[in-house]
Image (cartoon, rainbow, N blue to C red):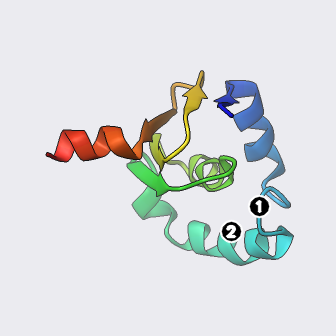
Amino acid sequence: MVSTWTPEYIDKLIAKRMGISVYGEKVDKYLMPIFDKYKLDIDGKIGMVIGTEKPWVEAHLLATGAKQIMTLEYGRIISKDPRLTPVLAREIAALYL
């Protein structure tokens, strides 16, 4: 199955923030203060998320001010959102080699 991420979908996750984690709202409540604490380190930066079922961590990072997020995943993801760049594990391995 191929996931498609649109700007509208990502913006909905960013606006919601609570209850977007695949592990339940407790994880969002736990992580949001940590993201906020490191806002100056995240703001305007490019980051990477390793593995995802849905872009909930990416949404938290974008909400905290990240400029761009690369997501490393084994399954194919199509991103129509310019802030998110999915990459397959085999593709990044080829870049490294």
Residue 19 lies in quadrant: bottom right
Mark 1 crowd level (few <14, some 14–19, many ≥20, 10 Å Cα): some
Task: Work out whether 19 lies above or below 65.
Answer: below
Q: Which of 2 and 24 is in front in this view?
A: 2
Q: Quadrant of the C terminus?
A: top left
Task: Work out whether 7 lies above or below 24.
Answer: above
Instruction: Please name the amino acid that badge 1 sits on.
Output: Val
Percent x, y of residue 14: 73, 45
Label 2, label 1: how many angstroms apart (C-alpha)? 15 Å
User: Left or right: where does residue 55 sit relative to residue 68?
Assistant: right
User: Left or right: where does residue 48 sit relative to residue 94?
Assistant: right
Residue designated by label 1: 22
Q: Nearer the viewer, residue 75 or 34?
A: 75
User: What's the residue at 51%, 25% (across, down)?
Assistant: 82
Mark 2 crowd level (few <14, some 14–19, many ≥20, 10 Å Cα): some
User: What's the residue at 80%, 56% (across, down)?
Assistant: 20
Percent x, y of residue 17: 78, 55
Residue 32 marker: 2
Residue 2 marker: none
Percent x, y of residue 72: 45, 48
Instruction: Please name the amino acid that badge 2 sits on.
Output: Met
